[in-house]
Image: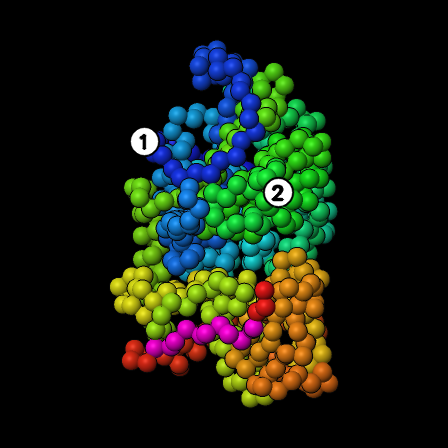
Amino acid sequence: MSSVPRRTRRRTYAFLASAAGLATAAALATALPADAREEHHPHHPGRYQDVQLLSFNDLHGNLEPPSGSSGRVSEVQPDGTTKTIDAGGVEYLATHLRQAREGHPYSVTAAGGDLIGASPLLSGLFHDEPTVEALNKLDLDVTSVGNHEFDEGARELARIQDGGCHPKDGCYTDQEFEGADFPYLAANVQDDKTGKPILDPYWVWKKNGVKIGFIGVTLEGTPGVVSAEGVKGLSFKDETETINKYAKALQRQGVQSIVALIHEGGYPASGSYNYDCDSPGAGDGISGPIVDIAKNVTPAVDALVTGHTHQAYVCTVPDPSGRPRMVTSASSFGRLYTDTTLTYDRRTGDIVRTAVNSANHVVTRDVPKARDITDLIGKWNTLAAPIGDRPIGYISGDIGNTGTESPMGDLVADAQLAHGRELDPKTSLALMNPGGVRAGLTYAAKGAEGDGVVTYAEGFTVQPFANTVNLVDLTGAQLVQALKEQVSGPNEASPRILQPSAGLTYTLDLTKSGADRVVTDSIRLNGAPIDPAATYRVAMNAFLAGGGDGFPSLGQGKNPLVGTDDLAALVKYLTANSTPSSPLAPPAANRITIIK
């Protein structure tokens, strides 16, 4: 594919009254003379100009306020206690962003990828066209691609950028989809045939002589977390090398102020959004892939907007020259946004790094809803309602999706085991990747369906990928090795614990390291030890059956059989195993014994 040209922008600016927000701030302290800034001399620009950078990441098509734990953030209080705050919903995000821009004539809004893909039914049912329309209304300026932008392949991503009706499903309304007003950047994603990036590698924001370049990359490991079909014909290059390459290209064009949009992230030592990850020293409270990237990206880059891990942090990580540099992430699902001040030096064309400051703000739901977003959601809800409102099951309590082993993960695995046994009665067990379980199920009614009712839309939110349920034969030795791959190899630093179907039990000893964390002798299937030489029929989704998420042993299965899609399997299981008078109880999530 050729590089996608940027569409003509259709911009409208809505400025609402400024409102105080909840924030956590990190700053590289220095004071610049107030009279040097343009705000004080609007007709005679001073040397220094503050530019507001608003950013968010990993929206995943959550136009409506996400439910359960997916719609809350935790906040550390001055006394050390923690409280939770309801957060998210694009109607509120729009209002917060518009309020934040008030009084900031130099303001640019950027994102760190995964804005679409793995979306609730309201967006996913329509190939995420509703989310792109909403992002256009949010006045998003630029974003990097994330791995989920490739869920439906590069050709579909080009349609998201350029517009046009879906090649299979056509147009959903009497107006053709216009595509994104903002450029998607994919500097490190190359077309194997041309050797060139499939989308623009960078974009430059300009206003009154102020120029800031944005370089966008996704994680190099994208092929390991996306279906093979979605990344066919593409190569994903090293994030750091790519950013450094295009930073030089921007500098040759006279652009000295550079921001990297990186769909890769880190893990702060606390789950609270206002945790100080610069304590006791710069960047000491954060770990994960982004730390190594941040320490090696050229000092020419002035700030890093990141994502992928769905974590919240505002840290300063030293660049290769030893100078602290801002690294931010705004959680996920539109629950937070980051407000960063970049002080631009008109004399050098660069950012005065020591003047950079940044804060994460909660997208609270105590502000007015943005009417244009409400209207957009209403339009798409009308189209989705006949499908989404259909009851598919009944539950007696919340079925959460948090924890090493989650009740929702167990339920999905049980549903896939049941479907596997319909295809082949010899099916022994099922395994589900945790990243494929996108939400839990809440007991409280979301609409008019009533408490305990599970609708198709809610099921779609749990499993939006349209993976098929596949059966393969694995030896006992391969099965044990797959369990060890949860905590070794590429998954050693950040374990991916497969969600087991009923009957599979074992102990996970987190006091040990690597593969030793899986206690081999403890692995049982229906009470019996795993026989390394025996053959087991295993159900899993197509992604895992292809060795995805760092499970090569699962990709070695024999005698494959492809069943229905995973959501259909979940719907059938819920319908068969629950009624209004006999709802399904949340699984106990006790199949894995965890030693900490």
Dot 2 falls on a residue whose secondary structure is loop
**Mark 2 nearby-residue class (10 Å; few <14, some 14–19, many ≥20):** some
Q: Quadrant of the C terminus?
A: bottom right
Q: Quadrant for residue 203, please give it.
A: top right
Residue 586 lies in magenta, yes or no?
yes
Image vertical order of residue 260 relative to residue 387, above or below: above
Q: Considering only order in the chain, which callout, 2 or 1, is on the residue closer to the N terminus?
A: 1
- As shown in the figure, which amino acid type bears the numbered disc 2? Asp
Q: Is residue 158 visible in this depiction of the protein?
A: no
User: Which circle, 1 or 2, is nearer the viewer?
Assistant: 2
Q: Give the side of residue 267 with respect to residue 334, left or right.
A: right
Q: Position of residue 398 (x, y in %)?
A: 38, 67
Question: Residue sitting at 36 percent across and 70 percent down?
Answer: 397
- As shown in the figure, which amino acid type bears the numbered disc 1? Ala
Question: Residue sitting at 67 percent across and 60 percent down?
Answer: 492
Image vertical order of residue 207 relative to residue 486, above or below: above
**Mark 1 nearby-residue class (10 Å; few <14, some 14–19, many ≥20):** few
Q: Position of residue 45 (x, y in %)?
A: 50, 14
Work out whether residue 367 or residue 189 is closer to the camera in this orientation and state it.
367
Residue span colored magenta: 583-593
Question: Residue sitting at 58 percent across and 86 percent down?
Answer: 527
Image vertical order of residue 343 relative to residue 262, above or below: above
Q: Give the side of residue 12 with respect to residue 548, left or right.
A: left
Instruction: Residue 191: give its label.
Output: none
Work out whether residue 532 or residue 10 is closer to the camera in this orientation and state it.
532
- Residue pointed to by mark 1: 17
Dot 1 falls on a residue whose secondary structure is loop
- Residue pointed to by mark 2: 284
Residue 201 lies in magenta, yes or no?
no
